Structure formats: C-alpha cells, structure tokens
Image: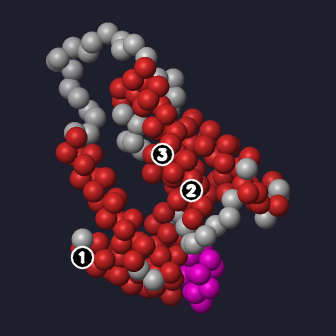
Amino acid sequence: KAREGDRQALDHLFKRYIPVLRRWTTGRLPLWARDLVDTDDMIQETLMRTFRSVEVFVPRHDGAFAAYLRQVLDNRIRDEVRNATRRPRGDAISESRADSDVSPLEVAIGSEALRRYEKALGRISADDRELVVTRIEMGLSFEEVARATNKPTADAARMAVGRALVHLATEMDHE
C-alpha cells in the first residue's frame, strides 16, 4: 500500500521502523563524530528519504525492507564520520574525564556477533528467518507475528519463534 502512495501505510511503516532503527543505530555513531546530528535526526532523515522513493523498492526476500533501511542508515552514519574527520577538532578534553564510550574491543565483539548473526540468518529456512525478523528485528508482538506468519495463535507464534531462535543460535555456533 505504501508503494502505491497510501499515506496511512507510510505512517504505519514510519511508526513500525523508528524503534527498530533506533535499536540498530544506538552506539554506532562515535561520540567524536557527533555534531548537531543525533540518532533520532538521522533515523527520521533516513526514513523520510527512503519513503520518498518507496514505490521503486522491490523486496527480494523476507526482511529485505528492514535490511535496506539499515544499509541506508549505515551509509548515513559513514557520511557523518567522514564529515567529522574533515571538521577541525574542538578543544582537548581533560585527562581526568572518564571515557564513557565503548572500547574498540567491545565494538569488535559486537560487530563480530552481528556478522555471525547475519550469516546465520541467511542459512536458516525462509520460515524461520521470517519469524526471527518479525519478532527480533521488527519488534512485533507474538500476536502480530502470528498474523504476519499465518500462525493460528500468539502462543503458536511464540513457540515457532522459540524454535527459529534455537535454529539461529545453532547456526551461529557453527561459525
């Protein structure tokens, strides 16, 4: 419906993906690269740009739109980092101030887990992938997952998601 210009469908997508993208973006823009742009601004800008051309988007698999939005947002973050390296640095921060940013090791562990997750997601069945994406990435309730995946009840969806997560974890362990 959104691809056909339905404003209510666009508003629904907007409301659905803001929390998903907020979780995805949190901590990805280094503190030193932040200027006047904050996470919510980047998310809103990404959604607005994407929705202006949503009619040309063709989903090729379950979760394709969410993956597309994450890629657009990643590109936006890279742009901010590039722009920050071109700007002159501000005054030096006192050595007595504690660093609240994540360490390079924490970043590496997080990105490694994400890489393993994405590879494993590609190896599980399409049905399991749909369950994981709708519940975990999109943050839908079990009732919504049941409707989206044609499960008879929210409990059936909960059980199916649980099995899909076990399959995903098994695939992640194979790395």
Question: Disc number at residue 68?
Answer: 2
Q: Which residues are magenta?
A: 143-155
Q: Residue at x 62, y 77 (%)?
A: 148
Amino acid on which the number 2 mark rests in the picture: Tyr
Q: Quadrant of the C terminus?
A: bottom left
Q: Which residue lies under the disc numbered 1?
A: 174
| Residue at the extreme top | 91
Asked where in the image residue 88 lies, by quadrant, the reply is top left
Dot 1: within a 10 Å radius of its alpha carbon, few (fewer than 14), some, or many (20 or more) residues? few
Residue 142 vs residue 159: left or right?
right
Q: Does residue 158 lie above or below 121 as drawn?
A: below
Q: Does residue 138 lie above or below 86 as drawn?
A: below
| CB under 8 Å between discs 1 and 2 | no
Amino acid on which the number 1 mark rests in the picture: His
> Regarding mark 3 in the picture, which secondary structure is present there?
helix
Q: Which residue lies under the disc numbered 3?
A: 74
Q: Does residue 43 lie above or below 3 as drawn?
A: above
The answer to which of 7 and 114 lies nearer the viewer is: 114
| Residue at the extreme bottom | 152
